[in-house]
Image (tube, rainbow, N blue to C red):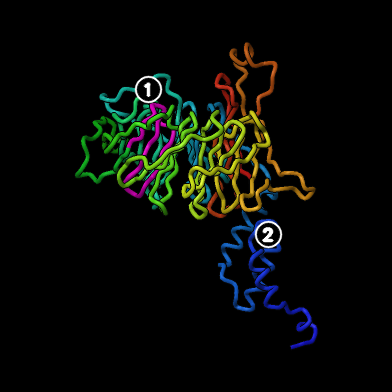
């Protein structure tokens, strides 16, 4: 061994110190350097992919550039989900289910599944608020033609499989799969419904369609219906299969933990910030839920549900409209056209090279200058709220979409940050 290398060799105590500081999130480049150094001595316990994923989650956002899409005159994108490395499905306020080709920008509309004559539609229907894929990626769940009913499609063909009805009386706000067979919906009527996607031998009834172009599908009622005590509208759901628990968020800031095996609430509490609690996500690896409200994000550890960590939004009053975890980094979509990134391990927002918090500002999108706009909104500017966003499987491309925040405005935005 050369003298030069001997002089550079770290002592064992220094390695212990290095391992303690590895993956702190403060310096991702240094984390990778420390990992490679410790790996040479066989004392590195972390997997290489974990270190790389952490680096990607922190380094990629500042490298992304926007590619905005023309969605025509549809109204507000409320939900979205990557179908594969090229296609994104999204649902709109005007109750359209669309598939976007991220390479070409082409749009394809998926016909909504019709409910039976026994289903009574909700008053003032307000579009598709949720899209969810089952764990195996073979079934696609969203809202039906009646916004209080559930629609299940087969992937990748989008053949209709089932419509779930007679469970909710108002809009379905969120959907969460428990496994490949069972899923839960949460609604504006403050109820949770448990559904089962059966095989052909167990269905209640089937559709009676005259057209041969639409395959026959099942029509089913829920397996169970439960009312969320104290909840004013069930706004968001998150399932953590590591703990077999379903987190439920109400608009009036009640946070519930439900046992999915008994379909009963284990515990609940009211969060500190009570205005506009409309979005939630879960980090299964960190056992942590993030709840977005008007001016704050609450981090809830279900193992200590009475202890909260609060993140103050950099755009207070604009509202947090969407949240998602990518490793330790929390992505935050605001109501004022900005996307932020908070490092939960370092306890601060990701920063630019100059040391200021990094912010992505989305494009103008489409805004209808109709009579309603000219009469009530013409004198002000209205940036697009980010109602939905999702990274692809690589963590290097972010689809973000939404539209103007005021309910009276008609418009849309969708973009791919890559």
Query: Would you say the magenta stretch is mainly helix, strand or loop?
Result: strand
What's the residue at 29%, 31% (across, down)?
211
| Whether residue 384 is visible | no
Image mark for residue 55: none
Residue 314 vs residue 354, the one in the foreground: 314
Which quadrant: the N terminus? Answer: bottom right
- Is residue 213 inside the magenta stretch? no
In the image, residue 179 lies in the stretch drawn in magenta: yes
Looking at the image, which residue sits at the far bottom?
Answer: 1
Residue 272: percent from left, percent from top: 55, 34
Upstream in the sequence, badge 2 or badge 1?
A: 2
Q: Which mark is residue 28?
A: 2
Q: Secondary structure at mark 1?
A: loop
Does residue 58 appear to the left or right of 94 in the view shown? right
Identify the residue under disc 1.
Answer: 122
Give x and y (percent) for residue 393: 53, 53
Magenta residues, start to end: 172-193
């Amino acid at each position: 061994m050369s003298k030069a290398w001997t002089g550079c060799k770290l002592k064992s105590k220094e390695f212990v110190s290095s391992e303690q500081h590895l993956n702190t999130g403060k310096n991702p480049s240094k984390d990778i350097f420390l990992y490679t150094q410790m790996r040479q001595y066989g004392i590195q316990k972390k997997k290489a992919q974990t270190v790389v994923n952490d680096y990607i989650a922190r380094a990629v956002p500042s490298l992304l550039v926007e590619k905005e899409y023309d969605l025509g005159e549809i109204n507000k994108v409320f939900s979205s989900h990557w179908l594969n490395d090229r296609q994104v499905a999204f649902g709109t306020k005007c109750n359209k289910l669309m598939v976007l080709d991220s390479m070409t920008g082409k749009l394809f509309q998926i016909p909504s599944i019709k409910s039976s004559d026994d289903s009574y539609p909700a008053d003032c229907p307000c579009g598709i608020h949720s899209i969810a894929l089952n764990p195996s990626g073979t079934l696609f769940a969203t809202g039906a033609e009646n916004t209080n009913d559930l629609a299940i499609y087969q992937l990748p063909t989008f053949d209709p499989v089932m419509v779930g009805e007679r469970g909710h009386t108002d809009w379905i706000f969120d959907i969460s799969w428990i496994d490949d067979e069972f899923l839960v919906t949460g609604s504006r009527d403050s109820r949770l419904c448990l559904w089962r996607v059966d095989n052909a031998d167990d269905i209640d009834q089937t559709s009676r369609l005259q057209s041969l172009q639409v395959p026959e599908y099942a029509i089913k009622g829920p397996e169970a219906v439960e009312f969320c005590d104290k909840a004013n509208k069930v706004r968001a759901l998150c399932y953590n299969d590591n703990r077999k628990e379903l987190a439920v968020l109400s608009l009036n800031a009640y946070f519930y933990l439900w046992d999915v095996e008994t379909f009963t609430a284990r515990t609940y509490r009211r969060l500190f910030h009570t205005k506009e609690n409309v979005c939630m996500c879960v980090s299964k690896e960190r056992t942590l839920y993030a709840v977005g409200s008007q001016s704050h994000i609450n981090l809830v550890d279900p193992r200590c549900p009475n202890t909260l960590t609060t993140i103050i939004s950099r755009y207070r009053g604009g509202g947090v409209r969407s949240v998602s975890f990518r490793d330790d980094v929390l992505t935050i979509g605001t109501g004022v056209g900005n996307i932020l990134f908070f490092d939960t391990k370092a306890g601060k927002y990701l920063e630019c090279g100059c040391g200021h918090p990094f912010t992505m500002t989305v494009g103008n999108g489409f805004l209808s200058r109709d009579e309603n706009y000219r009469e009530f909104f013409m004198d002000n500017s209205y940036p697009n709220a980010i109602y939905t966003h999702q990274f692809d499987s690589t963590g290097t491309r972010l689809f973000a979409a939404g539209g103007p925040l005021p309910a009276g405005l008609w418009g849309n935005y969708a973009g791919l940050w890559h």
